[in-house]
Image (cartoon, helix red, strand yellow):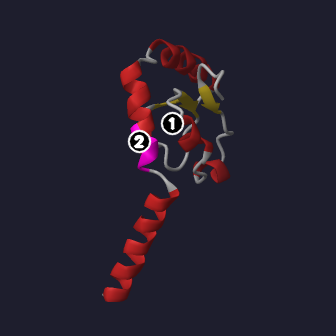
Amino acid sequence: MREFDVAIIPHLQNEFNRHTNPMKLYEYLAAGKPVVATPGAGLDEFKDLVYLAAKPEDFNQALIQALQENGNELKERRMVAAAHESWTERVNVMLDKIFAKLDS
């Protein structure tokens, strides 16, 4: 991954993948890499950091854009966003929901 200029997540657009949240997204963001991906679950919340391309012809344009816009500020924002998506953070969110349900 160190040698990547751009990380890609090119999933087929089907019912299964529309509900898949790719864990490699968080690895790529943690490394500060620009990411070009096909749409999928969980990616919308990173729309300011991830280049989404639903069609193959849009994927090439998104790759070019990702390369051109890969400044240090964006790298830092990607790493900060990934830090908020750790397993500890995810477990805390789940526990909060469970305890809220138990308290109601």
Magenta-drawn stretch, dominant element (helix, strand or loop) = helix
Place of residue 74 in the rendered image (x, y in percent of width and height, measured from the top left): 40, 25
Residue at x 46% of width, y 43% of height: 82
Give the labeled residue for mark 2.
Answer: 81
Place of residue 99 in the rendered image (x, y in percent of width and height, measured from the top left): 37, 81
Q: Tell me which label, 1 or 2, sits earlier in the chain.
A: 1
Quarter of the rendering occupied by the N terminus: top right
Place of residue 100 in the rendered image (x, y in percent of width and height, measured from the top left): 33, 80
Place of residue 79 in the rendered image (x, y in percent of width and height, measured from the top left): 44, 36
Label 2 element class = helix
Cβ–Cβ under 8 Å for marks 1 and 2: yes
Front in this rendered view, residue 58 or 47: 47
Tell me if residue 52 comes above or below residue 67 in the rendering: below
What segment carries the magenta color?
80-84
Give the labeled residue for mark 1.
Answer: 29
Tell me if residue 102 comes above or below residue 6 in the rendering: below
